[in-house]
């Protein structure tokens, strides 16, 4: 019998959280090697988890509670209210009575002390993925459709609407309409903001592999000004807003970002965000 959200040929979908970048990367890589699980999103900020879960409706949410589990649990109640079938598993550095009580109130399904190791965590994940959660009201959040995720990935690769329409055999109007739906679901206003938020949430694919196996992954070196402009782009700013933020002329922004695009191998601001994210150059520049 297949578990929640699974078929005989697919695994349970997982969203992973950790505010510790290296731990999160290692966790996602480890989950990717497990045949029964597929990572469909990741977050550095626990506050982002409810929206990410609404977008992807995962079977499991794996949360890094760290040293202060109780402080981490607050946003998880929104997941329980909006995604009733999703199982919530929290990794904690120390299992205390206060953590157990707070976890129960937040609707957490399992607390796993990190000291028990990965085998214990894998056992809990498998157990939680076996069947549907009972006694919880299930709502139907407005997640991204497969078509919208495809368009979002192409936006993250720097393709304009006209090219996306040609690639998908669609009309420019239909692509623009899908973009508006994506913006509404991500709670953003521009293409750059959409790609930045999607990159931060792990909704667009990364490019952390060399073009050829015999070539090392090359991360371009940016000047201080180029790095400032990249951060501004990742926050969804326009050229005018970037110029005002950095107290420089708009022409200076345009000239500097042209050199930035060349280093990243892209042609526009959205593509720069996707490329920088894929190279691990962005931490968490998420628009408000």
Image: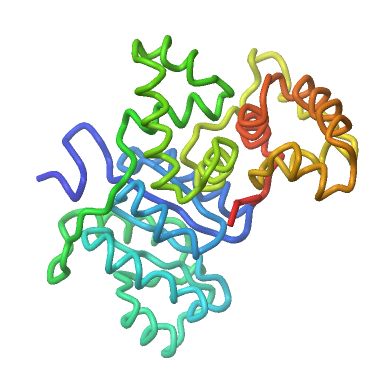
Which of 250/199 is in front?
A: 250
Picture residue at 64% right of the left edge, 15% below the top: 211
Picture residue at 60% right of the left edge, 51% below the top: 286
- Judged left or right of residue 158, residue 14 is left
Residue 13, compared with residue 51, is above or below; it is: above
What is the count of numbered marks? 0
- Judged left or right of residue 98, residue 267 is right
Q: Can you say which quadrant of the picture contains the C terminus?
A: bottom right
Residue found at the far bottom of this picture? 97
Residue 88 on image: x %, y %: 34, 64
Which of 166/106 is in front?
A: 166
Residue 240 on image: x %, y %: 76, 40
Picture residue at 19% right of the left edge, 50% below the top: 4
Residue 173, compared with residue 134, is above or below; it is: above
- Judged left or right of residue 101, residue 183 is right
Residue 256 on image: x %, y %: 85, 29
Specify the quadrant of the image occupied by residue 99: bottom left
Residue found at the far left of this picture? 1
Which of 256/124 is in front?
A: 256
Q: Can you say which quadrant of the picture contains the N terminus?
A: top left
Residue 272, compared with residue 281, is above or below; it is: above
Render colour scheme: rainbow
């Amino acid at each position: 019998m297949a578990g929640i959200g699974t078929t005989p040929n697919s695994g349970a979908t997982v969203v992973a959280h950790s505010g510790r970048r290296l731990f999160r990367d290692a966790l996602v890589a480890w989950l990717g090697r497990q045949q029964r699980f597929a990572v469909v999103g990741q977050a550095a900020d626990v506050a982002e988890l409810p929206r990410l879960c609404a977008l992807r409706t995962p079977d499991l949410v794996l949360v890094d509670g760290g040293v202060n589990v109780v402080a981490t649990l607050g946003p998880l109640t929104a997941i329980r209210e909006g995604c009733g079938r999703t199982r919530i598993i929290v990794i904690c550095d120390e299992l205390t009575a206060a953590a157990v009580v707070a976890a129960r109130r937040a609707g957490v399904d399992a607390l796993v002390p990190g000291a028990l190791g990965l085998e214990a965590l894998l056992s809990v994940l498998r157990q939680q993925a076996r069947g549907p959660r009972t006694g919880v009201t299930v709502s139907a959040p407005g997640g991204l459709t497969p078509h919208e995720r495809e368009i979002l990935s192409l936006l993250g690769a720097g393709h304009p609407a006209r090219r996306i329409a040609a690639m998908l055999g669609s009309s420019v109007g239909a692509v623009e309409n899908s973009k508006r739906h994506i913006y509404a679901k991500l709670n953003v206003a521009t293409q750059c903001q959409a790609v930045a938020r999607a990159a931060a949430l792990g909704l667009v694919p990364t490019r952390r592999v060399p073009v050829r196996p015999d070539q090392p992954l090359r991360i371009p070196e940016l000047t201080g000004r180029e790095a400032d402009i990249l951060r501004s782009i990742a926050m969804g700013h326009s050229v005018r807003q970037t110029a005002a933020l950095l107290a420089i002329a708009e022409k200076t922004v345009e000239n500097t970002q042209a050199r930035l695009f060349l280093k990243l191998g892209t042609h526009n601001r959205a593509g720069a965000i996707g490329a920088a994210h894929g190279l691990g150059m962005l931490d968490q520049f998420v628009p408000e």
